[in-house]
Every structure is written in C-alpha cells, then in structure tokens.
Amino acid sequence: MPPWCSSGEYYMKGITHFMTGVAVSSFFGGAVEMAEYQKSWIMILGGMYGIMADTLDFKFYSFFSRDDYQIDPDPLNADPQKIAEQIGKAIEQAYDEYRLVKIKCHTIRLGADLWRQYVIKFDGEKGEVAVVINPIVTTSQIPYLGTEPKEKRVGRYALRVPLTETHGRPTIVDIMNGPQIGFRRIKGRVLVEFIPYHRTWTHSLFIGAVAASLAWLIASRAAGWNIGWYYGVVALAAYWSHLICDLTGYIGASFFWPFWKKRTPGLRWFKANNPDSNFIFNYLCLMVAIFNLNRFTYIDPIRRVGHYIGASPLRYFLSTCIIPIGIYLLLTAVFGEKKREEKEAEVLAEEAMREEGAEEMGGQFS
C-alpha cells in the first residue's frame, strides 16, 4: 500500500485481500488436509496470492509509471493558481495529443510531523480545475485550524476542453508521497484517471493464470507433479478473488487484459476505506475459514480436532455471521454517527470556495 494511500482510500485494505485469499483456499479440502496433516503452507500461499495484484502494482509497476508533469508547490508560498494552471494545461494537452498525460502531485512538507494540505477538484460541469490551500496538518491528518492562508487561498483554471470525472469527490494531497493522476481523451472528452498505473495488467484474469502457473511449477519441482497442480489451482482462485473484491468498489479492474485493456468499472457497492465493510468482510472470511477447516479435517479423538462444531451450516452461519453482523449494524445505526461528519479541514475548504464565489464542493473528499 503506497504511503499516500495510507487510509486505504482507493482500494481495499491489504489484510482484507489476504483474508479473502485464505478463505478461498479453505474451500479446497485437499489444501486444508495438507495444511493440517502435512504442515503445508498452502493456505498462506492463498493469502499471499490474494494480495499479490496490489503488491505488483505498488511495489513494482509504480516505479515504471513516469510522470509528464511534477506539481511541486513552494512550501513557503504555495500558489493555488499556479497549481490549477499546471493541472489544467496537462488536461488540455491530453485532449490535443490524444494520449495519456500523467501528473505527480507532490506533498508540501513543512517539518518532521507537519504538512501543508491542499485540495484539487475536477469540475466537469463547470469545466474547471479548482485548487484550495488548506491548513497545516500532522502526519495523522489532524488539521491546525487557523493556519490556512488568509488570502490567495483558491485557484481556478477554466478548461477549453470537456472533462469527465468519475471519482465523485475532490482529492486531498497532504502527507507522505502524493498521488499520480492521469488524463486521457476518450470520445471527445478528457477522463480523469486516479492512479493510472493501478488495476491495469496486474488486475487481469490472464496475469492471475500466469502467476498461478509459477506456483504450480515451483511446487511441482519441490513436492512432485501429482501435488504441485493443487498449489496452482489454489493460487489461481486466490488471485482471482482479489479481482472480484475490487469489482465491488469504484475503480474496477482490467479483467480481460491484454485482449481489452480498459478497466471494467466497479459496481460501487462499497468504498474501499469504509471501516465497517472491511471489518465485516474480514470477519466473514474468518468464519468461513473456520467452518471449512472444521469441515475438511478428519475426526481425531486423540488430538481433538475435526468436526468439533456439530452445528449444521445454516445454524453455524446464522449464529456466527448473520446474527452478530446484524447486531453490529444495529448498534452502529443507533449509537454510531447518523451521517459521516465532515472533517474540519474539508469544511474550511468549502467555505473558501464559497467565499470565492464558487458552489459548495459537497461530497466526501479523498
């Protein structure tokens, strides 16, 4: 997970993908038996392949994604108008040259634990790019109210080309390493692509098969061809489970690369940084894994393992999943926040936009 995405904004938490891979591997009785009686690491392999797609993106492929423009504001005098103009010209270049143009939005570090926050909004309806300089924040993204500039806080650039922004909210740039944003002309409009190197070839069924083939070959050389194929099947199922999980979000994945290189849009069921959905999903994976571990281990009265849960599948999942999750959601609805409160820094950015005569930003910020 890249530092600038430390909040898990653009994709599910790494632990969630790992747990998914383990849960998927538990559906293979042979994998459970090998883990139990042969002390095999095959289920850990499932977890590793569950997170592999993101690992390839952020630990490898990201270093090959070169930027066309560097947005590097002056720490002592960040100029929102200059930032907006740089971004706007990159968008127009993508339109004129029919190619992907990428920018790198660097953070503004002021000290060991101090950062100047700024917000970028791509407004397709108004045809402009707006930039707001926000207060100083800590590495924990806690703002120091009153540290925002008193003047020249908002910058705008009126675009001469049509723009499409599908993420649905402005982008905050504050701590660690800033994001890369791409612009691509599609059907007469410029599409804003967040993290253009993410969820491309690594998030495809084909690469999943290639990666699983490596597990099959290595395991076959080490344990024999009659067993190695099972490692390959588990690895393939775990890798593909990552793609299915990503489909529930916003960005989607490039399922059919290299035959079709465009991302398949996500279903937008969950936001990747939603703590409730991540917690519930991890809990479900754990309960599924326990159920399968019990189901596929033989009765051994001496070691007291195997079939020690006597409940039927319906009773098991009712008592361990449906009822507990229902209670959790009820408690969250009653005692939790009725509506996600806006961060103080976001409110200040909205106020700055209104003061400059722009409409309220609205929505949630990246």
Image: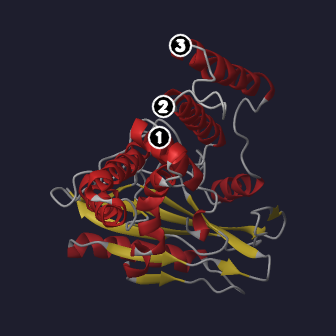
The correct choice, above or below, for 161 with respect to 361 in the image is below
Q: Quadrant of residue 282?
A: top right
Q: What crowding class fits label 2: few (fewer than 14 Cα within 10 Å), some (14-19), or many (20 or more)?
A: some
Is 203 in front, or is 191?
A: 203
**Image position of 13 (left or right of 343):** left
Tag count in the figure?
3
Percent position of residue 71, x then y: 51, 81
Percent position of residue 16, x then y: 56, 47
- Precedes in sequence: disc 1 or disc 2: 1
Query: Would you say the residues marked 1 and 2 are in contact, meaning their CB atoms lie under 8 Å apart?
Result: yes
Residue on which disc 2 sits:
296
Q: What crowding class fits label 3: few (fewer than 14 Cα within 10 Å), some (14-19), or many (20 or more)?
A: few
Could you tell me which residue is drawn at 48 percent across and 73 percent down?
59
The correct choice, above or below, for 246 with respect to 185 in the image is above
Q: Nearer the viewer, mark 1 or mark 3?
A: 1
Q: Residue furthest front?
A: 302
**Image position of 124 (left or right of 287):** left
**Image position of 147 (left or right of 125):** right
Amino acid type at mark 2:
Phe
Residue 73 shows in the view:
yes
Percent position of residue 218, x then y: 33, 66
Is 350 in front, or is 199?
A: 199
Amino acid type at mark 3:
Leu
Q: Secondary structure beneath disc 1?
A: helix
The residues bearing labels 1 and 3 have C-alpha atoms spaced at a distance of 24 Å
